[in-house]
Amino acid sequence: MQSQKTSIKQKLTLMQLSDSFFPSGSYTLSHGLESLIQSNQIQQSEDFMTFLRLLLYNKIGTCDLVALIHGHQGSAANDLAKVRQADTQLFAQTAIAISRQTQRQSGRALLMVAQSTWQSQQLETLAGDRLQGCFNCLHPIVFGVVGSVAGLNSTDTALAFLHGFVTGLLGAAIRLGILGHLEAQQISLDLAADIETVLLKASAIELDRMYSCTPTIDLAQMRHAQLNTRLFAS
């Protein structure tokens, strides 16, 4: 009975972290989608699916998620040096200034919420490191640590992160008018196999081998600040 209670608690934690209701600030990000829509490079659902899969396979799954998994491993081993290493490596890999800024902002928001939700010395230490300037507090790294502190294994933490990323972009696509709610639900279901593939690939990548290659999306993110009207921060 005790193990069943533990399992239920972990499942509820998984749902809590992956729910858009969880206030990490990621709902303010479109990851270049808004810019691509305004430049007419994304006009329909098929274009959006290509955009989403490019991000999953060539950026999130080969960079952000890799760093998250290594950050989770460091936290689970109570090795904050490894957490900081993952944070530093991801910062170095994130070449676009607006991406670094939004990663830091959403990471700080997540850390603040986590500190008030889970009592953990690791979270307190990392918050102090951020104030001293020795921790960038990037969102994927903080997410990995929070998952570990909350009792989730690395697979469940990574799935929560991927689910939150996908649903956040689906929400952005709905708000930007290229998807309807029913279509978004079908896309979410269709992406299950992609998410599994991305997770398995990320789990096998060493921290110093992570990479990203999405030049068109990167350029769209850099143009985002020059848009006349904007709903999203990136």
Image (cartoon, helix red, strand yellow):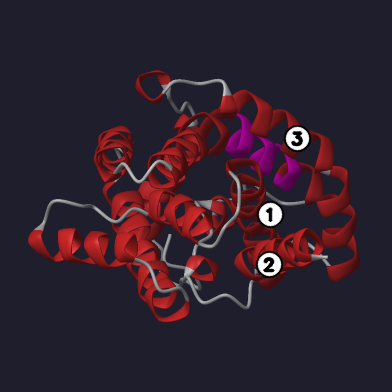
Q: Give the percent coordinates (x, y) of residue 113.
A: 43, 77
Residue carrying label 1: 163
The residue located at (40%, 41%) in the rendering is 77
Total count of labels: 3
To which quarter of the image does residue 215 belong? top left
Residue furthest out toward the front: 1
Mark 1, secondary structure of its residue: helix
Q: Which quadrant: the N terminus?
A: bottom right
Residue 177 in sight here? no
Q: Earlier in the sequence, mark 1 or mark 3?
A: 1
Bin the neighbour count of mark 2 within 10 Å (Cα to Cα): few under 14, some 14-19, many 20 and up: many
Mark 3, secondary structure of its residue: helix
Bin the neighbour count of mark 3 within 10 Å (Cα to Cα): few under 14, some 14-19, many 20 and up: few
201 in the magenta segment: no
The residue located at (64%, 72%) in the rendering is 20
Q: Give the percent coordinates (x, y) of residue 233.
A: 42, 66
Q: Give the percent coordinates (x, y) of residue 55.
A: 58, 38
Look at label 2 and name its amino acid. Answer: Gly
C-alpha separation, residue under disc 3 versus residue under disc 2: 21 Å
Residue carrying label 2: 171
Residue carrying label 3: 196
Q: Earlier in the sequence, mark 3 or mark 2?
A: 2
